[in-house]
Image (cartoon, rainbow, N blue to C red):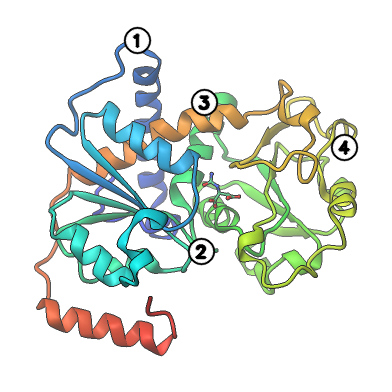
Amino acid sequence: MSASFKHLFGIAQLSRQQIEHLVHLGESFIELSRRSVKKAPTLRGKTVINLFFENSTRTRTSFEIAGKRLSADVINISASTSATKKGESLLDTGETLAAMQPHVLVIRHSISGACEFLADFLPDTSIVNAGDGAHEHPTQVLTDLLTLHVQAGGVAGKTMTIVGDIAHSRVARSHLLAAQKLGYKVRLVAPKTLLPRGIEQFGCEVFHDFDAAIPGSDVLYMLRMQTERLTSNCCFPSIREYHEAYGLNAARLALAADDCRVMHPGPMNRGVEIASEVADSARSHILDQVEHGVAIRMAVLTALCGNSPESSPSPRSKRREKAESAMRAQGKLL
Ligand code: NCD
């Protein structure tokens, strides 16, 4: 079975079978990274461009390593060194890079929907969402699913308790979508100010008291405060009080079952959402997540590069006009 899709915008577009296929493909790539010669010819002749408009350590590096280990040519561009600094729009940057005929464009952007927007008029390029605003972060969630597949025999029937800044977290949103498809339960724990209104529609349980949510949890998934997306600093009283109410320390972890696992997508803010004694403990799978992030990105690049464009594009000028007027209407044209 193949995953069979042209772009990866989010977990929302994937079926349970496609998610499972990517997780199994990812599992098959773990071993390659542990060899002394970490190279396979799978993507020879393919070009992958990483275009990052937001900071990243894990995601950008793992896409780069994944592409290189599979023999693709990988180019990294960050907003701080690109022509966007000279006033070029996202649209023009995308079209410029697409004119160089890459197979895959991996994009991280602060605007939700930026990848779908670009895909509309880059018909020959596969686009991978490496995190778009507070919308989705599919490869992080696939990475977490691979970690739980390898370390805990999968997620079906398990309860994942996600704690922290849910309101601004694309990782939480992608997990809520994956949980519905794969049959795991999600508990969300946060102060009211860090929870989006109507989040219960995803079928999750909502808690404001962290201690009450711990018994029965199979995974405690800690989130960083997404300060880059906070519009005001009134979401929580102080770092100290936040840590007391929502930080995971050893005393709190003692309320969990012995086999409850701790995860975090990184970057961690030690002493805020997680204490070092937990982050560095045997219960923590944070570095496993990092290792599996490379394997999952190998799987995603392999799945995408095996596919050719699905349909013939509408004329470029028409697509551009349509896309620009939609973005202008939303006040989002960069
Ligand atoms: C996450 C992200 O960028 O959304 N990190 C990541 O990709 N490893 C979570 C975060 O930044 O807190």
Q: Are marks 4 and 2 in contact (CB under 8 Å)?
A: no
Q: Nearer the viewer, mark 1 or mark 3?
A: 1
The three-letter amino acid code for the residue at tag 1 is Ser
Asked if one can make out residue 285 in the rendered structure from this viewpoint, the answer is yes
Q: For the residue labelled by badge 4, is the local secondary structure a helix, a strand or a loop?
A: helix
What residue is pinned by disc 4? 252
Measured Cα–Cα span from mark 1 to mark 2: 37 Å
**Residue assigned mark 1:** 36
Which percent across, then down, holds residue 232? 73, 72
Q: Which residue is mark 3?
A: 150
Q: Are marks 3 and 4 in contact (CB under 8 Å)?
A: no
Q: Amino acid at mark 2?
A: Gly
Label 4 vs label 1: CA separation? 40 Å
Indicate the position of residue 97 as horizontal and vertical percent values. Answer: 21, 58
Placement of 205 over or under 151, stated as above or below: below
Amino acid type shown at disc 3: Val
Q: Is 323 placed left or right of 19 in the picture?
A: left
Per the image, label 1 sits on a secondary structure element best described as: loop
- Camera-near label (2 vs 3) is 2
- In the picture of the structure, the residue carrying the numbered disc 2 is 133
Q: Amino acid at mark 4?
A: Arg
> For this view, does 214 lie left or right of residue 232?
right
